[in-house]
Image (cartoon, helix red, strand yellow):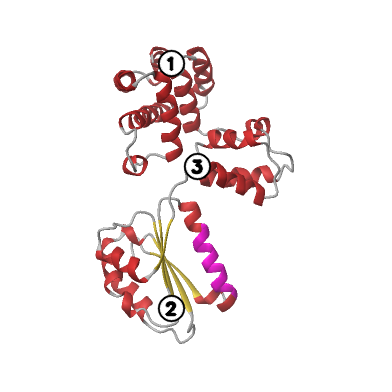
């Protein structure tokens, strides 16, 4: 059997692969499973492993990760799919395969195929509720949004935070999340950006001051610029499909920026505002590069006040 598991949702893809591996291991033992990094493997060595019979393990499972990062091996595998011997199961787990290639088309025709997309909006919230429930945690519905906001919607981070909250053996509330879940810098950047767009400049500046003694201003500036980019994508890509995947923006971030954009005004007002913000941040970034390191946070603060 050949499996093609692909997509940018690395967490759910990994879990699905792990389920297949666990089932195979229970039936045939750990020695029957081979994990391979396809990103730098020699094509001929790979094919030899796939097409040759192993007398010591007549039933084998080969897990081939990141083959999409090795164009030569990707082509070679596609040309040899019909040579995979009986008794050998092959899992090809990749993030962004080129769907135009012969290999992808051959796998679509002959393999068991599953795509794992990043979750967004209510899908992400529903998944998080399932995570909390399957961990035996009671939770308040408002805690779900609090968790997503604190982690920036990153599913790996959400899974880790749920595991951490489980050890507390308490009902998960927004207050508990704020107490034990440290917002990542990207989440802080979004919060400050959203606050200032919404006219809450003083609150934004207070939050910015908290970060000044803890974080790298250049990294924060980059994240602030990414918020402006996401806002521009939400405004100019409104109504278009696959904007998030095309521009490599997390769907959660894009959906939140859509909400922010609607507060600005009509379509023309939104476009003019994001143009001004982009120009301001670009000018601030240039000033930071020409200034002393100790002046960076002051320049960022001035920009926040002007947005």
Q: Earlier in the sequence, mark 1 or mark 3?
A: 3
Residue 20 magenta-highlighted: yes
Residue 10 magenta-highlighted: no
Report helix, strand or loop for mark 2: strand
Q: Is residue 266 visible?
A: yes
Which quarter of the figure has residue 75? bottom left
Residue 171, horizontal then vertical, whole percent: 72, 39
Q: Is residue 288 visible?
A: no
Q: Which residue is mark 1?
A: 301
Report helix, strand or loop for mark 1: helix
Real-space CA distance between mark 3 and mark 2, rounded to the nearest whole angstrom: 35 Å
Q: Which mark is residue 218?
A: none
Callout 3–callout 2 Cβ contact below 8 Å:
no
- Identity of the residue drawn at 63% across and 30% down: 178
Residue 160, horizontal then vertical, whole percent: 59, 46
Which residue is nearer to you in this view: 116 or 291? 116
Which residue is nearer to you in this view: 250 or 127? 127
Real-space CA distance between mark 2 and mark 1, rounded to the nearest whole angstrom: 60 Å
């Amino acid at each position: 059997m050949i499996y093609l598991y692909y997509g940018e949702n690395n967490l759910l893809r990994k879990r699905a692969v792990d389920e297949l591996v666990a089932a195979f291991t229970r039936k045939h033992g750990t020695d029957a499973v081979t994990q391979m990094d396809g990103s730098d493997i020699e094509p001929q060595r790979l094919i030899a492993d796939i097409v040759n019979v192993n007398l010591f393990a007549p039933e084998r499972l080969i897990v081939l990760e990141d083959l999409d990062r090795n164009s030569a091996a990707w082509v070679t595998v596609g040309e040899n799919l019909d040579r995979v011997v009986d008794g050998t199961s092959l899992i090809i787990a990749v993030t962004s395969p080129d769907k135009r290639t012969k290999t992808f088309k051959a796998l679509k025709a002959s393999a068991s195929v599953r795509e794992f997309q990043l979750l967004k909006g209510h899908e992400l919230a529903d998944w998080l509720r399932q995570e909390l429930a399957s961990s035996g945690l009671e939770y308040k519905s408002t805690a779900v949004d609090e968790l997503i906001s604190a982690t920036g919607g990153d599913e790996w981070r959400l899974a880790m935070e749920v595991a951490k909250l489980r050890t507390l053996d308490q009902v998960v509330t927004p207050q508990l999340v704020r107490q034990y879940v440290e917002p990542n810098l990207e989440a802080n950047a979004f919060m400050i950006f959203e606050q200032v767009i919404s006219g809450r400049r003083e609150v934004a500046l207070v939050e910015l001051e908290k970060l000044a003694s803890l974080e790298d201003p250049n990294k924060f500036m980059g994240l602030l610029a990414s918020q402006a980019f996401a806002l521009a994508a939400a405004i100019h890509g409104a109504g278009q499909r696959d904007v998030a995947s095309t521009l490599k923006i997390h769907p959660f971030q894009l959906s939140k920026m859509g909400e922010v954009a609607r507060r600005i005004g009509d379509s023309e007002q939104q476009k003019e505002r994001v143009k001004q913000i982009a120009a301001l941040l670009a000018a601030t970034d240039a000033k930071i590069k020409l200034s002393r390191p100790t002046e960076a946070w002051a320049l960022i603060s001035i920009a926040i006040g002007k947005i």
